[in-house]
Image (cartoon, rainbow, N blue to C red):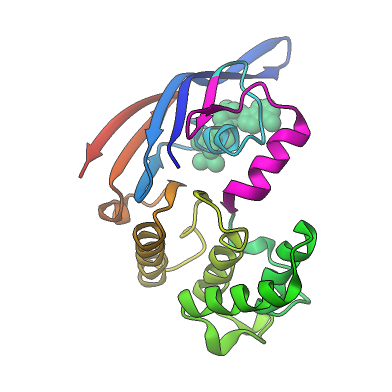
Amino acid sequence: MTLHLDDITLAFPDGDQRLTALDHVSLTAEPGTLTAIVGPSGSGKSSLLAVAATLITPDSGRVVLDGRDLTGLSRAGTAAVRRGQVGIIFQSSNLLASLTALDQLLVVAHLAGDDLTAARARAAELLDAVGLAAQADKRPHQLSGGQRQRVTIARGLMNQPSLLLVDEPTSALDSQRGEAVLGLLRQLTTERGLTTVMVTHDTGHLEAADHVVRIVDGRTSELATR
Ligand SMILES: Nc1ncnc2c1ncn2[C@@H]1O[C@H](COP(=O)(O)OP(=O)(O)OP(=O)(O)O)[C@@H](O)[C@H]1O
């Protein structure tokens, strides 16, 4: 599923002025590729991800997913797109403390109203794919930082998305665990033909990406393409 951001602008209220977060940003991401978004703090990375996720409506420009313009959709319409086609992976801190790894994934299926027998099989398969088959019954405090991040990745794949949006997947990890998580995202992107867009501070791991887009003051420039 190809993601196309076309000439996006976004400004937030800032006192009696407006602060430009995204300034005519365009970006195309293809299935099976991993695009890394890098840039200084406050440059617009999270805003870009939120617009791509249809969580924020831009002031102008279009978000197009496989030829379908999502910009004019209602709230219910964008929620349906997110449920059906978009996986969103935030930092691992938003796991639910009282739930096992397996149940973290089943919550997604439960909220979507999915058949729980099929969901259980899919959750087990995903935990296996991220190397956590043996940790399915563990709660977050019983897992390492890297393992927790793997649970969030598996959870982000529960709705079988085509577009995967990932925010700072390695920020809470040491460099070795960060590298392993990036390797996993790279592998899942290729194997499942995902269109993956990842915001990262971590410029040490950019070789895992097909495209690196730099954003400064809301404006993008492509740094490198493999
Ligand atoms: N909800 C909001 N209301 C007002 N201003 C906002 C809001 N969200 C972001 N901003 C502003 O928009 C600009 C871009 O913010 P954004 O969070 O996209 O940057 P970022 O590159 O993700 O930063 P960081 O790396 O620190 O997370 C910043 O100046 C920020 O202060």
Q: How many marks?
A: 0
Q: Is residue 59 left or right of residue 79?
A: left
- Quadrant assignment for ligand 1: top right
x 43%, y 47%: residue: 195
In the rendered image, the vertical position of residue 221 relative to residue 136, given as above or below: above
In the rendered image of this protein, does residue 44 appear above or below residue 161? above
| Residue positioned most to the left | 226
Q: Quadrant of residue 30?
A: top left
Q: For this rendering, which residue is in front, 119 or 198? A: 119
Residue 158 locus on image (x, y percent): 61, 63
Is residue 124 highlighted in magenta? Answer: no
Give the camera-side residue of 209 and 83.
83
Q: Choose between 146 and 54: the one closer to the eye.
A: 54
Where does the N terminus fall, quadrant-wise?
top left
Q: Which residue: 54% across, 21% down? A: 62
Above or below residue 122? Residue 156 is above
The quarter of the picture where the C terminus appears is: top left
**Residue 92, percent from left and from top:** 60, 63
Left or right of 150, for residue 221: left
Which percent across, then down, holds residue 82?
65, 44
From where the camera sits, is residue 108 visible? Answer: yes
In magenta, the rendered stretch is 62-89
Q: Residue reaching furthest top? A: 16
In the image, residue 153 lies at what x, y percent?
A: 54, 64
Q: Residue drawn at (62%, 23%), measured in percent from left and top?
A: 71
Task: Answer whether residue 87 is magenta in the image.
Answer: yes
